[in-house]
Amino acid sequence: MSSFTLLQAAIELPGAAAAYHSDDMMDVDAHMENLDEVTASVATGFRIWADRLRAEYPIHEDVVERLEEMYSSLAKIGAQAQEVSEVFKARHEKDIARRVTPRVGERKWNVQ
């Protein structure tokens, strides 16, 4: 039996999350902006697999339809992921503003 490549890819995600590190909160901000792309990629993977199964395998249409429902559900999570980014920006608005448009000598506050 061959390995299930979708599962192999998914298994890497928890490890990537556990290994996540950034010394710069502006990177964290940018990563938050990309959360919807993460969910979109997962959703697209299910859609592509469903299309391939339909086109190349003797599979019952009900099975493919359920996979397409999974795709639709995952695609909706992208909107929630975008909300996470919006909440991050709203809750850290002042921090981001200081970083994007620092005052003269801002670093002298030496906030650690």
Image: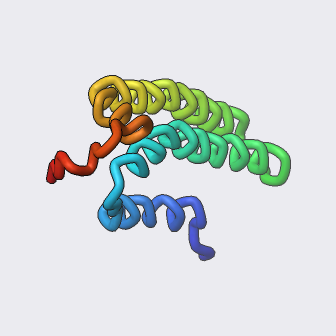
Q: Identify which residue, 84 or 58, lies in the foreground.
A: 84
Q: x%, y% of residue 36?
A: 53, 36
Q: Quadrant of residue 2?
A: bottom right
Q: Identify which residue, 97 or 55, lies in the foreground.
A: 97
Identity of the residue drawn at 63% across and 38% down: 63
Q: Residue furthest front?
A: 104
Identity of the residue drawn at 58% across and 73% down: 3
Q: Is residue 56 above or below residue 8?
A: above
3 relative to 53 in the view: left or right = left
Identity of the residue drawn at 28% across and 43% down: 106
Identity of the residue drawn at 27% across and 27% down: 91
76 relative to 44 in the view: left or right = left
Q: Residue furthest right?
A: 55
Q: Is residue 43 above or below residue 77?
A: below
Q: x%, y% of residue 40?
A: 59, 39
Q: Identify which residue, 54 or 14, lies in the foreground.
A: 14
